[in-house]
Image (cartoon, rainbow, N blue to C red):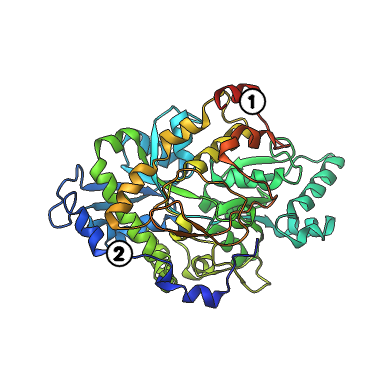
Amino acid sequence: MKDNHINRRNFLKMGSGIILGASAMGLSSFRSVAYAAGNTGLEKVKLSLGIIPLTDCAPIVVAKEKGFFSKYGLDVAISKEASWANIRDKVSIGALDGAHMLAGMPIAATLGVGALPKPTVTAFSMDLNGNAITVSNDLYERMMKADPEAMKSSSTSAQALKKVIDQEKAAGKEPMTFAMVFPVSTHNYQLRYWMGAAGINPDQDVRLIVIPPPQMVANLRANNIMGYCVGEPWNERAVEMGIGRVIATSYEIWNNNPEKVFAVTQEWAEKNPHTHQAVIMGLLDAAQWMDKPENRMEVVKIISAASYVNAPEDVVKMSMTGTFQYTKAEKPKDLPDFNVFYRYAATFPWQSHAAWFITQMLRWGQITKPLDIKKTAQSVYRPDIYREAAKALGLPAPTIDYKTEGTHKAPWSLTEATSPIAMGSDMFSDNMVYDPAKLVKYLAAFKVHNMQVSIADLEKMNG
């Protein structure tokens, strides 16, 4: 999984060669819909958008602070929320126009997983990667003692945890507690994927609980949990404080995995199509600007403010400037793709990504009735809306909605697009291949699961 890594120096030199700026032609083509001087065509100008204090709220924050929203006639207020449940509920009842959401949240909201169903859509992926699994110093040492060979690689480190768990069981101890941020979060599925690949059943062998991101570090320090999966800056915060060690990043679990999305209710999208497109255009401008290495320190300064992430700049910059620190005693390592905001078609809402999250909801028993996976994915992830915004800006966009994962170890080019798009590696830590044309077969291949729907019933609806 190191094939597409580049060193820090090259990261800082990438610049505009791989980032396409919004063209004057694109802005001109949109003036018939919305122009900052007159707000022509916008159904709604004043918007309230929700965020959680994580570094990947940056596209929304930067779009506001750098004037990308106002460029398209939008007056945006940002509401910092305490939890993902708050985000979900406020968007659902209209208290927020839209929000920073976990990639699985609009799917769960639409299906009614964990709450009353409310059809929700996304036309914009906010980033790739960005999470990590951190464990306490004590657990890390126990894992090192149990299996030092497995600990040499993030892809096998869970095997060491499996040995510690087996030791605890043999001693009659209660299962260890780990935390993630929300039941349908990428963090939950990444933590489960990492454990499951080593034969750990996260529903039987450990105890998983939900803790809001800003509270992770305090709970680790208080020994309420032995580890967690969360976004930045809450892994690097634990490292900086010397109370935890990062055992694996989400990039190492699945190279260039989708992380957050911008989402609105389906009803809002239908009532405000021009406003929705203006928001997506502002976010596209922000994503391009943010992915230029020379702008990353300004991004750090903007989002570190108390009104947003509220964390020291020195902590926030650890993951945002091309490096990542796993332990306090070691030097930071080159990890230029820890935060990707525009490269590799990062902003495109792949329906194959939506389908992957649905397979994981099925795998872990969150969906208890058979469903048509692709039909559901198509109702929630809306590349058609994205393509309209990209076309208005003169930006390249994929012409397909589905792609395989786990087949590219090195950079590659997506030619099924309005113009070729440079893509990154997409390998899984266990070397599985995800083919969205064979969804049920993919799901059936997992040995560790808590399926509540039979494979036979899924095959009938996904033939």
Q: Which residue is mark 2?
A: 66
Q: Which mark is residue 117?
A: none
Q: Which residue is mark 1?
A: 452
Which residue is situated farthest in the left direction here?
A: 38
Report whether 399 appears left or right of 438: left
Of the pair 258 and 220, the residue shown nearer to us: 258
Of the pair 321 and 171, the residue shown nearer to us: 321
Mark earlier in primary sequence (2, 1): 2
Query: Where residue 367 appears, x then y in whole percent?
Result: 56, 28
State how many labels appear.
Answer: 2
Query: Where residue 99 appears, x then y in whole percent?
Result: 37, 46
Q: Quadrant of the N terminus?
A: bottom right
Q: Secondary structure at mark 2?
A: loop
Residue placed at 77% from the left, 59% from the top? 151
Residue 48 in sight from this viewpoint: yes
Residue placed at 52% from the left, 38% from the top? 355
Of the pair 332 and 40, the residue shown nearer to us: 40
- Amino acid carrying mark 1 in the image: Gln
Crowd class of label 2 (few under 14; some 14 to 19; many from 20; radius 10 Å) = some
Picture layout, residue 421 above or below residue 169: below
